[in-house]
Image (cartoon, rainbow, N blue to C red):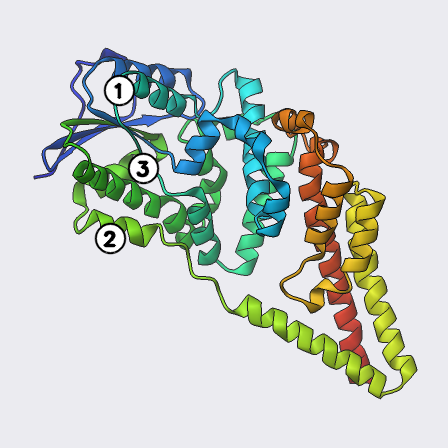
């Protein structure tokens, strides 16, 4: 039998806090909705755990967010060469954007975002209570959201997020109010999600269902607890309560289904091969029309891709060696879909200006403002990657347009 009820007033510290209880399968789950930047939420979590009432504590964290929360110094162990080689520059840049936003909030409000989650993990550990990480991996969530919408919505989502995080050093009151309703992941994306049903499903509804299934799964794996405290952002309180009360079926199968990364789409791969075939065919056609025609197309290709790739690298504050690498690599890498001019240029930048221990130590501080992305050697490698790649991409389109024009004017 599953029932929902309000929390009895035997924990005075939780009075006035967003709380819901769900009883099912002989276990009582107390869902405590917290605000990401609230001292009151920290105290409520601390008081609830100190009451001795609970046998386990569940928190709205995945493993990677948990590690970032309890060990932010892990940034100093970042292997940038490995990041570039594995094609994870975008994911690392997103993590650094959120980390910089978090640092600015901490400075402005006097409280580290996620302090209530850190308190829950710390206090539960000190009392010997098991800690359950129930949220879905952030990479899977973002990946499923990314695949759920079209190209232009993706661009709007990315540009809006970057603009909001890098706009200025002062966080607006409206953004702070959003954070008071939940965690940073929600506040960053909820506005976009509310305008798109696919985004809402991937970013919010699926996570509610995933966390409900994880709670049921943990109950089946651990020595059956009687009382579980669930610390979640207030924005998930109602959704998780409904999912936990009404969910049926195997929680193991539901978790496996909801955490499965979206399958890679085939069209980008075939588009890359199609671009290579078009370019090689265009050059072959140009030289078949005469050496002058072929040479003109080839020279324009080198100057457009190499020149704009190098300009992108210069805009990123690149070392002369990485600028030269960008110029040389940009005409060649589009002909090999597995390579990228940004990867090569950023790797050379990393070799020429190897980040120091101080760069890693200052990373969170430097990224509070957009200028720090150019000042810090760690962040500048990522800026180099993106701006060089952007310059090369623009050059490819310009050269391709010239080639098409030449074909139709022949």
Question: Looking at the picture, how far across and down is residue 67, in whole percent?
Answer: 45, 31
First in sequence, mark 3 or 1: give its number: 1
* Depth order, front residue of 247/258: 258
**Disc 2 on helix, strand or loop?**
helix
Image position of 50 (left or right of 284):
left
Q: CA distance from mark 3 to mark 1?
A: 18 Å
**Disc 3 on helix, strand or loop?**
loop
Which residue has dot 2 on it?
A: 253
Query: Quarter of the image holding residue 28?
Result: top left
Q: CA distance from mark 3 to mark 2?
A: 15 Å
Which residue has dot 1 on it?
A: 128
* Depth order, front residue of 398/342: 342
Q: Quadrant of the C terminus?
A: bottom right
The reply to whether residue 15 is visible in this rendering is: no
223 above or below 37?
Answer: below
Question: Looking at the picture, how far across and down is residue 351, in whole percent?
Answer: 74, 42
**Disc 1 on helix, strand or loop?**
loop
Which mark lies nearer to you, 3 or 1? 1
Query: Quarter of the image holding residue 285?
Result: bottom right
* Depth order, front residue of 241/48: 48
Q: Quadrant of the N terminus?
A: top left
How many residues crowd around disc 3 within 10 Å: few (fewer than 14), some, or many (20 or more)?
many
The reply to whether residue 69 is visible in this rendering is: yes
Residue at screen point 45% across, 37% down:
185
Residue lying at the far left of the rendered structure:
1
Residue at screen point 33% across, 46% down:
205
Which mark lies nearer to you, 1 or 2? 1
Report how many numbered discs are placed on residues in the image: 3
Q: Which mark is residue 134?
A: 3
Residue lying at the far right of the rendered structure:
292
Residue at screen point 82% across, 49% down:
323
């Amino acid at each position: 039998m599953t029932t929902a009820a309000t929390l009895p007033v035997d924990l005075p510290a939780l009075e006035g806090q967003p709380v819901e209880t769900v009883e099912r399968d002989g276990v009582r789950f107390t869902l405590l909705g917290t605000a990401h930047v609230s001292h009151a939420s920290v105290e409520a979590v601390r008081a609830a755990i100190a009451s001795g009432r609970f046998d386990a504590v569940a928190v709205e964290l995945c493993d990677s967010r948990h590690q970032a929360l309890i060990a932010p110094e892990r940034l100093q162990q970042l292997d940038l060469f490995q990041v570039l080689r594995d094609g994870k520059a975008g994911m690392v840049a997103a993590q650094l954007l959120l980390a910089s936003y978090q640092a600015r909030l901490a400075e402005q409000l006097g409280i580290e975002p996620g302090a209530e989650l850190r308190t829950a993990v710390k206090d539960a550990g000190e009392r010997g209570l098991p800690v359950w990480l129930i949220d879905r991996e952030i990479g899977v969530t973002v990946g499923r959201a990314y695949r759920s919408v079209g190209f232009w919505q993706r661009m709007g989502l990315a540009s809006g997020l970057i603009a909001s995080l890098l706009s200025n050093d002062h966080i607006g009151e409206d953004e702070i109010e959003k954070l008071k309703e939940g965690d940073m992941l929600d506040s960053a994306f909820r506005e976009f999600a509310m305008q798109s049903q696919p985004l809402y499903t991937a970013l919010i509804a699926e996570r509610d269902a995933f966390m409900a299934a994880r709670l049921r799964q943990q109950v089946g794996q651990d020595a059956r607890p009687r009382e579980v405290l669930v610390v979640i952002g207030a924005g998930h309180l109602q959704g998780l309560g409904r999912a936990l009360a009404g969910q049926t079926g195997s929680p193991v199968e539901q978790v496996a289904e909801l955490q499965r990364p979206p399958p890679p789409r085939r069209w980008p791969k075939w588009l890359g091969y199609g671009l290579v075939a078009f370019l090689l065919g265009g050059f072959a056609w140009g030289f078949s029309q005469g050496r002058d025609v072929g040479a003109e197309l080839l020279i324009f290709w080198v100057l457009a891709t190499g020149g704009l790739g190098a300009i992108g690298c210069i805009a990123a504050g690149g070392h002369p060696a990485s600028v030269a690498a960008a110029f040389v690599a940009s005409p060649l890498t589009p002909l090999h879909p597995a390579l990228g001019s940004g990867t090569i240029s950023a790797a050379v930048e990393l070799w020429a200006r190897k980040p120091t221990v101080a760069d890693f130590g200052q990373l969170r501080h430097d990224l509070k403002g957009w200028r720090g992305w150019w000042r810090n050697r760690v962040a500048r490698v990522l800026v180099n990657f993106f701006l060089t790649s952007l310059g090369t991409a623009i050059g490819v389109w310009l050269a391709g347009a010239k080639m098409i024009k030449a074909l139709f004017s022949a």
